[in-house]
Image (cartoon, rainbow, N blue to C red):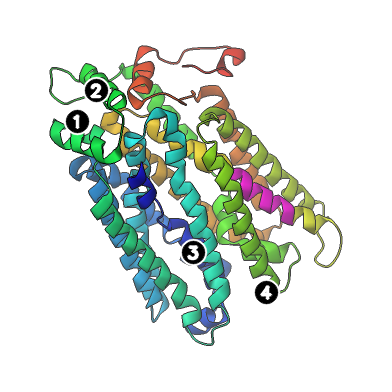
Amino acid sequence: MEPIKRLTWPPPRMDTGIIGPVTVMQKYTEDFGTTSAIVHGLIVSTILIPAALSAFAAGRVADAIGRARTITLGGLIFGMGAALEAGAVHSGMFITGRVIEGFGEGLFLGNLVVCITEISPPRSRGSLTSYPQLTNTVGLTVGFFSCYGTRSLDSSLSWRLPFALLSGFAFAFAGTSWFWLPESPRWLLVRGRKEEAARAWDILDIASADREKVQNEQEMAVLGGSGTVEAPPAEVKRARDGWLHLRQMFQMSGIDGILYYAPLLFERAGLSSAKASFLASRVSAIVIMAATVPAFIYADRWGRRHSTIYGGLALSMLMFLIGSLYASSSVHETHGAGRWVVIASIYIFAVVFCTTWAMGIKTWVAESQPQRSRSSATNLAYGSNWLTNFLVALTTPVLLDRSSFGAYFLFGGCTLITAIVCMMWMPETQGKTPEEIEAAFARKAPGKKSLFRLMRRPF
């Protein structure tokens, strides 16, 4: 699995750690002017819509040219967008760079998880597919601290340099994926390229027993050697696709509101000093990264289903707690325990999200899909998530301007709905090969079950 570890250090979340602090820097506002809350939200969230649009097409691209080439292409586009932001001379050029960056991110991020899912053995798939999330938290921390380190520069380099670093990382990631990432053996086998698949298995150092099991399961799923995986019954497919759309529709936890606008949230909680706000954001990044390490290590011991349900319940309760404190006027800027409860809850929210939803759901989405639609369905999920994140990033500053507590109740309610939906329909997929999961879906369609049975593993 060494090729995975060499590959999965891309910094998509580094942009998240950069854009919030950059847009409140003095030199940035001197160059581009001050903006209203809604324009600020649009600039920050511009990356998300193109990411969603390219993600909707990324599955088709990956099925046509391969996972590795699509990842490389996405990394190159992402790097070009970040370079354009670093060299922007007006706000239009800066926003164009964010749009280009978004198209690149939509191409590679979902397919990166798909590729790792397809080349990982079941016993370690959870940890390996969680590795990008671990490196994302590293990128988030690097982004925050790069801004903290450059904000005192008396030139536009204070906001340009973080984007230049991001562009360099993205190009390095693209080069790494081009030279060292082998193509998915499962993708090669479906296309009848057995010799190339064997070479890929060798590069990945997969045991003979594991690769033979995959080959046998895929051969049993192929109709007449045509290379097309047998489709499950129509009602099973409708149920699975309906579940995917329903779950993604309500997955609006508010995490991007916290990551993008951490300085603003800490200021609203009473840290009025700009330096204190930036420092608080840096501390949150360190806490998130530290919490992600054990989640990565134990990803294959924690079930996807339980981490999603219990994590969702915890996230919603934290949002309701913060909203209630603001609604009851218990948060004061200069004194009282309310503001410290809010600050602590923001830290805890970010930690819970990064150790539950950020790990389990991404793995589950990729491994629960059949080979023929894994890339398309996974990227559809990522695209849907980016659309909701766009709404979060766009509306958070507006909601905070209109109400001190409304955003927290909104995001908490959406998160609670997601946890309930997962409790009722989400099966456990831990420890099973993608072919075993597909066969289980094909054997039985979801029917009416008691709540007691729904709480157990359907598989």
Quadrant assignment for the N terminus: top left
Residue at which label 2 appears: 218
Q: Is residue 87 above or below residue 291?
A: below
| Label 3 packing within 10 angstroms: few (<14), some (14-19), many (20+) | many
Q: Secondary structure at mark 3?
A: helix
Callouts 2 and 4 close, C-beta under 8 Å: no
Residues at marks 3 and 4 touching, judged by CB atoms closer than 8 Å: no
Compute the Cα span from label 3 to label 1. 42 Å
Q: Please tell me whether mark 3 or mark 4 is closer to you in this view.
A: 4
Which mark, residue 189?
Answer: 1
Mark 1 is surrounded, within 10 Å at the Cα level, by few (under 14), some (14 to 19) or many (20 or more) other residues, namely some
Pick whichever of labels 2 and 3 is earlier in the sequence.
3
Question: Disc 1 or 4, which lies upstream in sequence?
Answer: 1
Q: Quadrant of residue 451?
A: top right
Nearer the viewer's eye, disc 2 or disc 3? 2
Question: Mark 1: which amino acid?
Answer: Leu
Cα–Cα span, label 2 and label 3: 44 Å
Mark 3: amino acid? Val
Question: Which circle, 2 or 4, is nearer the viewer?
Answer: 2
Q: Which residue is mark 3?
A: 44
- Mark 2 and 1 residues: CB-CB less than 8 Å, in contact? yes
What's drawn in magenta, residue-wise? 343-354
